[in-house]
Amino acid sequence: MLDAAEIGKRLLEFETRFGRGGVIDTYFAPGRVNLIGDHTDYNGGHVLPIAIQQGNYLLIRRSELPPARLYSASVDMEARILLTDIKKERDWADYVRGVYLYSRSVCADLPPFDALYFGDLPLDSGLSSSASIEIVTAIGLESLGCRLERSDAIKLSRRAENDFVGVFCGVMDQFTVAMAEKGKAVLLNCGNMEFRQIPFNIKDAVVVVGHTGVRRSLSATEYNTRRHECEEALRLLSAKVGPRQHLADVGISEFESARYSIPEKLAKRAEHVIYENSRVEEAARCLERGDTVTLGHLMNRSHESLRDLFDVTTEELDALQELSSSQPGVWGCRMTGAGFGGCVVALVKPDNVERYLRRMPSMYWKATHYDAEFIVTSPGAGAHKV
Ligand code: ADP
Ligand code: MG
């Protein structure tokens, strides 16, 4: 979160850039980090993300004449939206263009506008700045007279990312950014979209996110391979234990009774998904009853499973996780997101955070020759007007 003085400075910048007058509204949408449950989403399983404190801000004002004028202080770049002919321009503003375009299906007559984006969320780091800029735009349309239901904001934003920008992402990102509540995690069943707000009753740990310094080369091919392997495992297991819609619907004992009848590699993929799904539910119970020890343990098991069974970690993710989880005061640590680069998330005792942040960068650099970056955070609020 940024303070009022910081937001005030940006308001002045808005007026310098776009002129004075009219009502400027301010909106905020956070980034997110998934505490546990990776590669469970497209298998109809659970995830347990939190919104983080850091996010994207939007200053927005209705204008009289097109085009819409945009500026992002985060990347120091201007952009425009030609309202009569909205096309992909292959720049940062495509996320905004996509949301604006698709929201016309709900609000036919959207006026032009001026918008300034800024914030304290690292971009391109696996903390879902993309969902954050989409959702802040979607809820900011309220300022133009288009008040979207949260469910519409989520759908439009996801569509903007998948179809307009052309980047695949699951439903967790936009959902968390739009729906999270302060001090809670979101337990989301990606199979039927049922969800529960889980109180984050862990008082003896802070959430630290560590970026490996290696851009997630979401090697699209590897990701698609995993999806196919999971589909194939589901098909073979369904033939043994009875038809299931999702891999996460196969119970642990059912899986154990059938695992040796399917190829070993597929059994490993299925084992990850099925056990990870049950770890997520257990982790949610730990959050609620404040059981940091078990939660940390589950996070470590999750990482090992993503490394040894699902095969989506990298040397750098493994190094960061291993170094991190062996530091004093660390309850648990795991990679978070799709893998193949990106971030780890750790739970660290408040008294040990300073020492952790002091020691980790050089230890990690010695091990990998990459620069890691860390941010300290806590479960924050979902998108809202400021
Ligand atoms: P992540 O969602 O993990 O941050 P993505 O590659 O999915 O990574 O999306 C990051 C992209 O989203 C950025 O490269 C940029 O194009 C866009 N973006 C997000 N927030 C902003 C912002 N405040 N200003 C400009 N572009 C942004
Ligand atoms: Mg993203």
Image: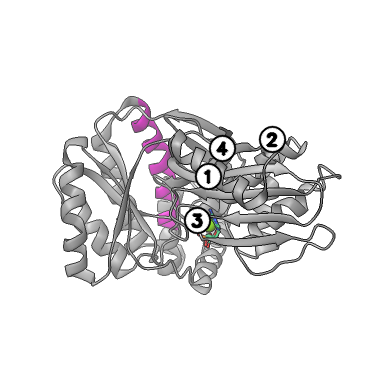
- Count the marks: 4
In the rendered image of this protein, does residue 378 appear above or below residue 120? above
In the rendered image of this protein, does residue 282 appear above or below residue 129? above
**Alpha carbons under labels 4 and 2: distance apart:** 20 Å
Point out residue 182 in the picture as x, y percentages from the top left corner. 46, 30
Q: How crowded is mark 2: few (under 14 residues within 10 Å), some or many (20 or more)?
A: few
Mark 3: secondary structure: loop
Dot 4 or dot 3: first in sequence order is 3
User: Quick check: can you spot residue 161?
Assistant: no
Residue 280 on the magenta segment: yes
**Alpha carbons under labels 3 and 1: distance apart:** 12 Å
Dot 1 or dot 4: first in sequence order is 1
Q: In this view, does 94 lie to the left or right of 351?
A: right
Q: How crowded is mark 1: few (under 14 residues within 10 Å), some or many (20 or more)?
A: some
Along the viewing direction, whichever of 71 and 289 lies nearer the viewer:
71
Q: Mark 4 points at which residue?
A: 383
- Identified at 59% across, 38% down, the residue is 27
Q: Mark 2 points at which residue?
A: 23
CB-based contact (under 8 Å), mark 2 and mark 3: no
**Alpha carbons under labels 1 and 4: distance apart:** 19 Å
Residue type pointed to by label 3: Ser
Numbered circle sitting on residue 275: none
Q: Mark 3 points at which residue?
A: 74
The quadrant of the picture occupied by the N terminus is top left
The magenta stretch is 270-288
Along the viewing direction, whichever of 15 and 73 lies nearer the viewer:
15
Dot 2 or dot 3: first in sequence order is 2
Residue 340 on the magenta segment: no
Mark 4: secondary structure: loop
Mark 1: secondary structure: helix
